[in-house]
Every structure is written in structure tokens, then in C-alpha cells.
Amino acid sequence: MSLMILDKGALAPLVNALMADYRVVGPQAKGSKFVFGPITDPAQLRLDYNTTILPPKKVLQPQQERLATFGLQEPQVEPVIEAEPTVLLGVHTCDLHAIRLLDTVFSQDHPDAHYLERRRQTVIVGLECLEPCDENSFCKDMGTLTAEEGYDLHLTDLGPAYAVEVATEAGEELLARYGTANEAGEADIRRLNEVLSAKWPRFSYRLEFEAAELPSLLATAYEHPYWEELGERCLSCGSCTNVCPTCYCFNVLDEVNMVLTEGDRLRRWDSCQLDEFARVAGGENFRETRSARQRHRFMRKGRYIYERFGESGCVGCGRCIRTCVAKISIVEGFNAIHGSPELAKV
Amino acid sequence: MTTSIYAPMMARLVAVEQMTALEKLFTIELPGGQDLGHDPGQFVEVSVLGVGEAPISITSSPSRTNGTFELCVRRVGDVTNALHALQPGDKVGVRGPFGQGFPVEKMRGKDVLFAPGGLGLAPLRSLINQVIDERGSFGRVIILYGAKRPEELLFRDELDEWVARDDVECLITVDRGDETWDGHVGVITTLFPEISVHPRNTVAVTCGPPIMYRFVLMELLGKGIPETQIYLSLERRMKCGVGKCGHCQINNLYCCQDGPVFNYAKIKGVEEAL
């Protein structure tokens, strides 16, 4: 829509003003790492962060949420939608792509009002990555080093100021109401283009082939011996799926109060890497081995989600690689399979 | 008023019948006596509030609604154990119906061969009774039912009825007999040599424990029934019923959305299916 310039000195007042009317969530330090968390003081906001432990999906699909409350004396159910006006600040482009996928997942077929209402009430402010977060990310391969949509406002650090791309009416209103930004001049646009083109050489490719080949590569790799190797190493802890910005699988369970009069039906993150994920009540487990579960994760990230939704299930953020205590790397895995396709066909 | 795909309707248990040591038949009425509107082979998510929710196939035929529907439930997990403790008049939560049922229209004019094993009779019964109620629009009706032991046979009254009918060929076997049993003994596949079919004109439908499928499929294919004319109803942990939670995924398919009834030709290359 338009390009504005926000002086860095004007950021704290903007955040302060937002805090009065919104839950503001943004990147902040936690020990030596960063997390998305509620901002209660603009000084907490760390737009210089590299990556966060958990992705911003937790703002849209919390680790736990109530789907309904119920009474037990006269059994009845009341749906609950937990949503509040939120500004999600400083979302890197890989995560913007991931949120767009979640939007598709939760709006397709049976629309999920719990997610969608929270999403509707969330204004997203993206943040252009100008430096690689570390050696684990492979956003350049996955085409997520930039994002053309999925945000209301998008910031690019120009040094003394941020360039603010205004992408939606909600973003425009937010900026006009809470911030003091000026329209970008020609010099600003030139500077922005310089900054954007200068960033590309700083990022390297890690995938040894085109990401577009992933679905067809994996379609031939079901019997590949690599899955057995992964099964030997995987500890089945579920960390990789918890930190994944596109993993949305969940469990639903009931919790009852102490006096057994009422309770909540809750939704919690779940993981296909856990032993019981595909087990049915009779005891049969349809994905019993760790190798089968890791294969399922790789297939979802590289193939199934693409086949179902037309978008990649992996955005190359590198979080699963960073977090894995067994040092399982999805990008190395993709490369290993690509490097020995003859093994895949047996 | 918010609407949520996860909020169940509160339905009432009209009748509860003990069928075997492990299975009970629940007759359920939706609020205001509204019709569930299901296809045979579909399932519902049943809640016992405070305990949780479980996917259960609908065992009653759409041709026999009467403002109620039936679920045949084995007591095997938390929710089903809690369900077994309920009495007529008690309330349960219901969501659904969900999933793809049996393609009844494609079966009209054809011979229909049913091969349920054990509790697999529950989902197939919804179709069997519809076929019987619309008997004239189908060819032969063949039912080959296997259970482990005589006391585990489900729907005994209806089995007797099917056996007695001239227009239904119903053979029943048990893996192990006892002193009360003078019928066929052997696993379900031992019934197949007893019947001959016109393979091109036969549609086969099967459901049973996971181990059973490959053996029944071998028999069906051995009789020359085309892969495209074989349907299977599969069990998975369908937690949400609406293609979101991921628990029931079979490779790239969701059992709750793409199934639970699958055409064999379409899933034979899907590695995790069978």
C-alpha cells in the first residue's frame, strides 16, 4: 500500500501506546536466547534477535487453550473462544510464511473458530532478516528469506530508522493511530533497496538441490535406509515438532475441577514423534518405531503438507536442528536422501 | 453465540444393551429428536464429559433412524469404559457425523459381499441393514462373519435373521468353538471357499482387526474381485474428526476426512494404510 519511515526513537513510544490497547507480543531475551513473550516495557523488545526458541505460532495456537467449558451436574457444554486484541511484533519472514500456512490449515474445510478468531484479532508486524540467524537456518533454500504477504506492517532496519511497509488497512490504522511515521522519500526507497539487495549474499544455500524437488524426491524415498539411521538416533522427545513453526497437531483432553461439578475441554500441542500419538485404544500403534515417526515428520515437512495445501511444510527456520539433542538435521536428511536416490528406489 | 467445530451436542442415551462381555449397544437421541443424517460407514465423536472424546462408527442404518442412532462400543479405553458405566437417560456429547461412508449408490445393482471380523461388524451393519431394507436394488447379499469365540458374536438376533432369510447368504465362523457351538470353526478366511461369486459384478466390503485385512484381501482378490470394487473401513485415533489434529493421518491421508471407508485401489499404494 505505502512505505513509511519510523525513526528508531519513535519505536518505544509506539510500543508504549500499543500496550494500552493491545496485548503486545514480541521477541525478548531469555538467558542467552530469545523468545516471543508479552512486552510490558518497550525496553524488553529485541528486534535485533536472531531466532526464538519457540516460534510465534504459540501466540495463535497456544500450548494449551480452552475449547469449551462443561457442567457435570446437568451435563452441558459451552464453547469458549480465547482471543484478545494482540499485536505480534517483529516476526521474521520464515515465521510469516509459517503463519500463512497455519491460516490455510485452520480455515480450510472445517474452519477452526478458535484459531481464526485469535488470528483475526492479531495484527502482525513483520521484520526483515538482514543477517543469517546461525548456521542452522536454510530459509534461502526454502524461499522464505523474504515475504510478500502475511503481515499488516513490515519493518526493515535502515540504521537510524525503520522502513515500514504498510500492507493492510489494519496496519495503516495501527500506525496512524499509535505511531509517528513519515512517508518515505526517494532517498529512503533507494536506501531500502540497497539494504534489501545487500542482504542476499550474506545468506548461503544449504540444500544441495532445488526445494521444489522435495515432494517428488520424498515420494520415492519411503523405503530409504536413512529412516532407520534416524530411528537409531532419535530419542522420541518431540522437541523438533514443538519448536516447528508449522507443526499444528494437537491433543484434546478434559480437565475437571476438584469438586467434580464442572470442567474444561482443553487443546494442547501434541507430537507425532511421541510413542502414543498414533496408538488406538485397543493397543495397536500405527507408527510404532522411531524411524517410522521421524519419516512421518520428514514426509510432512517436505511432501504431505505441500500435497495437501500447496505450500511447503518446512520454512527452513532451523529450529528443529538447533533443538535436537541427537543432532538430527532435516536439511542434512534431505541432502542425504537426495545424495543416494538409488537407495530410495529399492 | 460462538460456534466451534469442537463443541458437542448433548444427546440422550435412550437404551443401553449389553451385547457381549466387552460390547454394549447404545441407542442415542439427539436434542429435539433431530436426525443425525449419516451415511453408512461414517462415525461420530462421542464425549463423556470430564473423561474425553472417542471416535465411534455408527452401527445403525440410515434406513432405520426413528429419531435415534446406535453405537456398538467395546470397553477398551478411558472414554469407552466411562460410556459403559452410563445408564439410559444419561447424557453424552456427540459431534458428527464425520468422514466418507460406503458408496451405496455405486453398489446398487451389484452383488455385495460383506466380510466383517469381530467388532468390524459394527460399521458394516449400518450398510448391511440398508442393503436389506432396500433389498430389491441389490444383487446377491453375502455376509461372511468371523469372531474369535461364540460368546463374542455381536447382534445375535440379527445374525439369526440374516441366516434365516432366503435372500441373504450369511455364513458365520468362530476361531475356537465351545460346547454350545455347532457351527463353522476356523478363521474368517476359511469361509471363502464356501461361496462362489461373479467377481465383475461383486462389491466387497470389509472391516476388522488390523491383522485381518491382508488375509481377507488375498481371498477377495483370489476370487477375481477387482481392486476398485473392494472397500475397507479403517480404524485410527481420530481425535478431532475434522482433519486438523493429525492423529489419524495415514501417510498423506486423514482417516477422519478421506476415510474411514477407503477404496482398496486408492490406498493399496499408501504404505501406512494396511
Image: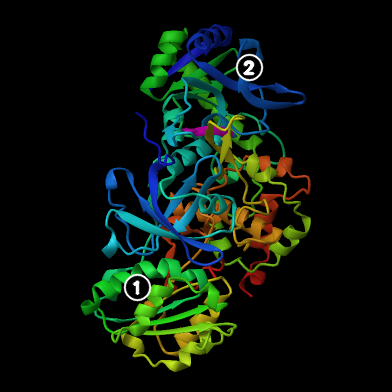
Q: Are marks 1 and 2 on the same chain?
A: no
Image-quadrant location for residue B215? bottom right
Q: Is residue A339 left or right of residue B103?
A: right
- As drawn, B120 above or below A150: below
In the rendered image, residue A340 lying in the magenta stretch gets the answer: no
Q: Amino acid at mark 2?
A: Leu
- Residue A170 visible in the displayed image: yes
Q: Residue at x 35, y 57 (%)?
A: B69
Chain under callout 1:
B
> Which element carries disc 2, helix, strand or loop?
loop
* Magenta-colored segment: predominant secondary structure: strand
Q: Residue at x 72, y 40 (%)?
A: A322
> Which element carries disc 1, helix, strand or loop?
helix
Q: Residues within 10 Å of mark 2 (few under 14, many from 20)?
A: many
Image-quadrant location for residue B102? bottom left
Q: Outermost residue, left direction?
A: B136
Q: Amino acid at mark 1?
A: Ile
Which residue carries the number 2 mark? A45
What x and y, as percent, mark residue A126? 52, 26
